Amino acid sequence: MEPVIMMPQIAPDEFLRIFIVATLVLVFGVGYAALLTLAKMGVVSKKFAPFSYLFWILQVYSLYDLSVLIHSSPFTAKVLAVAMVAYLFAPHLYFYLIEQSEERYGNSKE
Amino acid sequence: MSGKKVSVWTSITFWRRSAAWVTGTATVLLMWLTFNTMGQIAMGSDEDLQNGVTKRIPAPTVINYKIDYKMDEKRGHEVPVIGEKQPFFGKEWSAEEAAELLRHGKLTQQAKNCMNCHTLLGNGAYYAPDLTKAWLDPKWNDGTMTGITGKDTVEEAMAEFLMHPSQYPTHERMMPDLGITREEAVALVAFLKHMSAIDTNGFPRNFSQSAKRLEGGTHAR
Amino acid sequence: MLASIKSNEFKYESQKLAMNYFRVAIVLFGAQLLMGLIAAIQFLYPSFLFEVFDFNVARMVHINALVVWMLYAMIGSVYMLLPDETGIEAVGIKLGKLAFWVLTAAVAVVVLVYIFVQVGPGNEATIWLINEGREYIEAPRWADIGIVVVVLVFYYNVFATYTKGNRTGIMTVLVADLFALAGLYLCGMFFTDNISMDQYWWWWVIHLWVEATWEVFVGSLAAYGLIKILGAKREIVEMWLWIEVLMLFGSGILGLGHHYFWIGTPEYWWEIGALFSALEPVPLVAMFVHVLYDWGKEQGHAEAGQQGHAVNNTPAMAWIAINAFGNFLGAGIWGFFHTLPQVNIYTHGTQFTAAHGHLAFFGAYATILIGMMYLGVQGAYGIKKMTMTFKTKMAIGLIVFGVLGMTVSLTVAGYEQVLVERADLGGGWDAYFIAQELPWYLQAQGWRLTMGLVTFTGFLFLVADLLTIGKTEAAKEEEVQAAAA
């Protein structure tokens, strides 16, 4: 037999919070990536770069809140924690790739 | 290695190969899961029904049985429960007859384009009620629609409604007359009864409670 | 665009053929919007065209016109970039032109049958001749086979041209992606009396198109656009394209699981669907950041007077930028907040899905395909640097505002349905109609219709702009040149 997964009951007055929090997860996620990128590009001052981590923290909190609201299993909660740590490094990997690829391909002009 | 040190991370070949491997792995996994799912959603047989073996999609002869929708404490949601025998349009249908009827019903469902107003298993358009558990709907089972159509059984009432939907309006938004014949209507009702016996992992949620709740008539409570 | 028949600066026949595909696409886009308006009116006034042109017909033509115009614009985009990428003319261009007319004739017949015959008796003949009754892929079986033949001709053209000309990375991705895209259509071409089996394979076509192969297709178009419009470095763009392919297919293929929560399929799809569809927004974020980064960088180079050049087609670039954002917003946010099974059991089959569908199809696909049309017009007139006109701005403003407005309205309607019909009343006939008749729902539908009209007005500006911008901009460029000489 398959493992039994209980589908939790959600009270009507919890839905609005769930939808908003789910949206915030992505909004803060983009906020983190965007602010870091903008600082890197020099569109905004480099001084703002540390503030992007504030967005990441807010995102972690939103995702935590979401997982509580939808009654996630302990296993799912652990997967989410790992995913959030991975996302912390994602933009840095991205910039590393951009810099390296610029260095490798950027000089050979068309 | 050439003299200039280059990172593997900027190698187009590396990313092309990675993309191919990831796509390939995902595809293989999907195929493997598909084989498993195909086995689980293949229609059961008439013997399964007679022996009380539960299948996610029962045999067409499930139309010969009473179908209920009950809370399963272990799974945490409602599941269809197949009960004792119950005549369908006043008779018991053989395995061949039932299969032929279900096939005709499914064809009619497609030919009449039901899915572009209704949802079936939750998929389709949102202009009319979901049909997943229509057979079990309180509206058909509490005397309302049997009363309006003047029929004794749920199947007769459904067939009559399907043939002349705009003669029995219940709301301003009505079902149009789609030229459904008596044979097609009977087949459609069989299709709906069969669909209500499909194990949908508890969708729609709390369906069996709707009858109780609506009696109070206070969704705003 | 029609006027571009007169002005045709294209070097390649393939690109002239592309313009034909764009012309039909824009007509079908208009048809899609008109049908949507009829359906929106019927939500508010159910007696409108009752038993004359019912909701199911309007809805069917609405979504079919959508799919078909996008396929037309996609084929057009490929014929447009094919000579640029491979450096040669499409190999079987005569066959390609014939296929265009065959396909267009078939589409016309199918639409006329939809509109005038509508439904048929419940037998095989209806499925072969009138409609198949399966959402999005209603086309009758004869048309299915015709589409397969035409697509084979198209694919032959792409593949043969690819093998003969330059094999760029963008072309490699396209050749592989189009093969999957065409092959998946076959999954929707059989009949089964098992509704769960039916929907299982039906999603292979729908999901693996719009959340996997179409997304990769858009990634390729964006890559081509960045090189063509911004002069971005090919190696860098192609490296990113492969990373995007990795992420899109890595999440999108198994993301299919989020359609298998409630159709009779086993429970293990809950975890698979939740995990992979939660990952689906990640590549969309990456694409978004990538497009903006490249734009900012090239713009910066140009302003600093260095090499690299500024945007040479601002309307196209604007639509591609909206695409990057719209893809994230429509497919990412609007998809994510109802994709987890715990929430989806309440939202499945409500107007939430419609809200997501409207914004995602627009944001992810309509935008970039419109961008490709502007690139086509630029090529047809041989304009070096095309800039936005008043009409371009009106079109962008009204369409974006209209679609966002519709999406928000439908989200409100869906939210009301979730609370009243699903969470409280548990679904069923009465629950459904109680939710449909509450003021929140009706007002939301009212706003949806209003915003639909706004979108349609924007569409009129778009058509007017596509028809005239080439001539205006070409004349402007000539004037500047004359003044300089």
Image: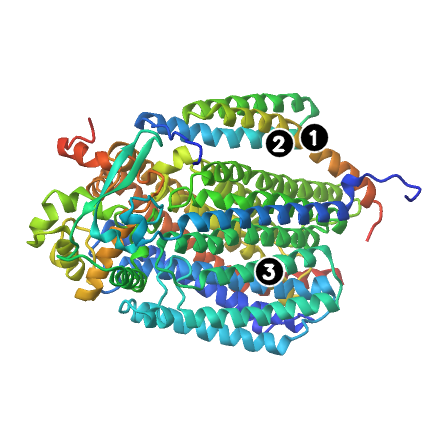
With respect to residue C12, does A17 lie above or below?
above
Q: Is mark 3 on a helix, strand or loop?
A: helix
Q: Which sits in the foreground, A44 or C235?
A: C235
Provide the chain ID for the residue under circle 1. Answer: A
Position of residue C286 relative to residue B188, above or below, is above
**Quadrant of the drawing holding the N terminus of chain A:** top left
Q: Name the residue under label 2.
A: A33
**Could you tell me which residue is drawn at 45 percent across and 38 percent down?**
C270
Q: Which of marks 2 and 1 is in front?
A: 1
> On the image, numbered disc 3 is attached to which residue?
C178
The answer to whether marks 2 and 3 sit on the same chain is: no
Mark 1 lies on residue: A92
Query: How far, Cα to Cα, is label 1 from label 3?
Result: 33 Å
Q: What residue type is labelled 1?
A: His
Question: Which of the chains bears the disc numbered 2?
Answer: A
Work out whether disc 2 and disc 1 sit on a shared chain.
Answer: yes
Q: In this view, does C292 lie to the left or right of C44?
A: right
Picture coordinates of residue C445, whole percent (x, y): 30, 45
Looking at the image, residue A62 sits to the left or right of residue B206; the answer is right
Q: Is mark 2 on a helix, strand or loop?
A: helix
Q: In which quarter of the image is residue C440?
A: top left
Chain of the residue where label 3 is placed in the rendered structure: C
Does residue A67 appear left or right of residue B165 in this picture?
right
Q: Quadrant of residue A20?
A: top left
Q: Relative to B61, say whether C381 is above or below.
A: below
Q: How far apart are marks 2 and 3 (CA)?
A: 31 Å
